[in-house]
Image (spheres, grey):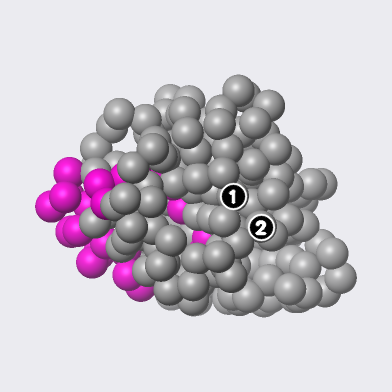
Amino acid sequence: MNLLILGRGKTGSMVAEVAFSRRHHVRVLSSAENENAAALTADALAKTDMVLDFTTPAAVVANAEACIRANKNIVIGTTGWYGQVPRLREMVLSAKTGFLYGSNFSIGMNLFFEIAATAGAALKYEYSGQIFERHHAQKKDAPSGTALTLQKIVREAAGQSAEKEVEITSFREGDAVGMHELVFNSSGDRIYLCHDAKSRLGFAEGAVRAAEWLAGKTGFFEFRNIWREL
């Protein structure tokens, strides 16, 4: 495929490397080259098969809107924009394009999400829950999209039995790639679950495989619901 990667940050650069290694044709645009989505016109995207966005919360919505208008499928790995999900879903379904987003494209983290769904039942049995997340100092959004997804999953698992909020504590320090800890405490014991990303490779591989999966499809998808189909 002819892939356009938006974002020259650490993750976007890794996505470009993985895509190239999987024999895709790759073009990369930095934020400076695509201010206010100006580079995403229908003519500019004519030879592009798929767009992958790893930019910033401030840029991602305009990028998504431009791709939808140009009838181009898009994979979004940027977080911090989820308040716009309902509106963008309507745009995608109306335009009959393909849209796939995820708070985390790592296969390991998506397995962790399923473990969290099982463990979330602890809140029905007088446990309290906490989430701790650590990322590099340059990360723009806090809490992370992954932490918010974990929080949502635990809430859903606990149902109406959860009387206490599952609080998120965020740390932004050094070059931490991404660590998420889920802790349940009771008077008798503690359950401790942790996912620690050693590099961005898992995110990048998942994102490129997601783009391959989305090719030729229409609809609005979340990665944690489709990753087993890759």
Q: Position of residue 78 (x, y in %)?
A: 53, 60
Q: Position of residue 27 (x, y in %)?
A: 57, 44
Q: Of marks 1 and 2, which one's residue comes earlier in the chain?
A: 2
Residue 173 vs residue 228: left or right? Answer: right
Residue count near mark 2 (Cα–Cα under 10 Å), binned few <14, some 14–19, many ≥20: some
Is there a contact, CB below 8 Å, between mark 1 and mark 2?
A: yes
Which residue shows up at 81% across the image and 46% down it?
198
Q: Is residue 53 above or below residue 34?
A: above
Residue 24: quarter of image:
top right
The answer to whether residue 62 shows anywhere in this view is: yes
Q: Position of residue 124 (x, y in %)?
A: 47, 60
> Which residue is outermost to the front?
43
Q: Name the disc covering residue 171, or none.
A: none
Disc 1 marks a residue whose amino acid type is: Val
Q: Is residue 187 above or below residue 5?
A: below
The foreground one among 169 and 19 is 19
Residue extent of the magenta highlight: 70-96
Disc 2 marks a residue whose amino acid type is: Arg
Mark 2: which secondary structure? loop
Q: Position of residue 16 (x, y in %)?
A: 64, 42
* Cα distance in 3D space between marks 1 and 2: 7 Å
157 falls in the magenta region? no
Residue 188 vs residue 45: left or right? Answer: right
Q: Which residue is mark 2?
A: 8
Which residue shows up at 35% across the image and 72% down it?
83
The answer to whether residue 185 shows anywhere in this view is: no
Mark 1: which secondary structure? strand
Q: Name the disc covering residue 28, or none.
A: 1
Q: Is residue 105 above or below residue 56?
A: above
